[in-house]
Image (cartoon, grey):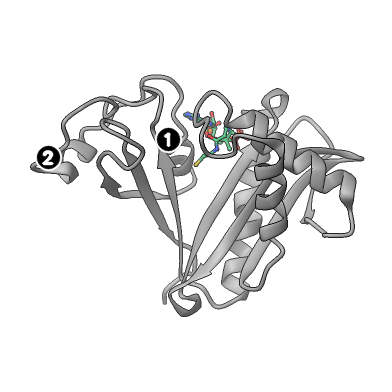
Amino acid sequence: MTTAVIIRDLEFEDSSIREQAAELLFRGFAHMSPDSWPTMRDALDEVEDSFGPGRISVVAVDGPRVLGWAAAIRQYGGNTWELHPVVVHQDNRKTGVGTAIITEIESRVIEHGGLTLWVGTDDESGLTSLYGQELYPDPLKKLSQIKNVKNHPYEFYERLGFALCGIIPDANGLGKPDIFLAKRVRRIR
Ligand SMILES: CC(C)(COP(=O)(O)OP(=O)(O)OC[C@H]1O[C@@H](n2cnc3c(N)ncnc32)[C@H](O)[C@@H]1OP(=O)(O)O)[C@@H](O)C(=O)NCCC(=O)NCCS
């Protein structure tokens, strides 16, 4: 990591950090997934939701500047947590910030007694070989043949030990799937 990054809780009282996290989300998905957070208000609402019960919300900061933000949602009685959302500032990608944030979330999930962390990662703009394809009648076979065409983040998760585990064809419209990955975060003896 090239910067003096600190990973810490995103605290509700910290309005500047909150707004920067929302801006990362709004800008970070504008091209890739424009309907996810179409306005800053939507992004701010997502940040505010991340303070609710059964949530983990973690930022990477360098002094007053937010480099990345990720949150997780408790599911299945706490055995499983969903990563949602995950974003790193454009200028700080591929410097280990995303890895540091997810690693912290994994530790928090373990502290909460969780076993599995999963993420759904859409392809709405032709970033993988699955975009625009007919995935039926065997979506899992198509998933096993996935290729990364333009830096789709599924490979980021694979590098962190997540495994491709499912897909919803047409989740975001015809030919726009949602791709699922999961990781067992707690060591099993
Ligand atoms: C995906 C994202 C969070 C990754 O964060 P990051 O800080 O760039 O990731 P890191 O620097 O920790 O990368 C860890 C490894 O994954 C690789 N990687 C990162 N993004 C990748 C991508 N899009 N495609 C393929 N590999 C990727 C890195 O090269 C690095 O590989 P290495 O271990 O061989 O060095 C960031 O690119 C981002 O915010 N993207 C836009 C929003 C987004 O896609 N969020 C996830 C939606 S589910």
Residue at 63% from the left image edge and 55% from the top image edge: 71
Residue beneath disc 2: 136
Residue at 58% from the left image edge and 48% from the top image edge: 85
Instruction: Locate ligand 1 by image quadrant.
Output: top right
- Alpha carbon of mark 2 to alpha carbon of mark 1: how far? 23 Å
Q: Secondary structure at mark 2?
A: loop
Instruction: Locate residue 133 relative to residue 164 in the image: left or right.
Output: left
Q: Position of residue 19 (x, y in %)?
A: 81, 42
Q: Is residue 82 above or below residue 67?
A: below
Number of the label disc, if any, that sits on residue 170: none
Q: Is residue 5 above or below residue 11?
A: above
Residue at 57% from the left image edge and 31% from the top image edge: 29
Q: Is residue 96 visible?
A: no
Question: Does label 1 point to a residue whose CB lies under 8 Å from ligand 1?
Answer: yes
- What's the residue type where badge 2 is placed? Tyr
Q: Is residue 8 above or below residue 122?
A: below
Q: Position of residue 168 (x, y in %)?
A: 28, 46
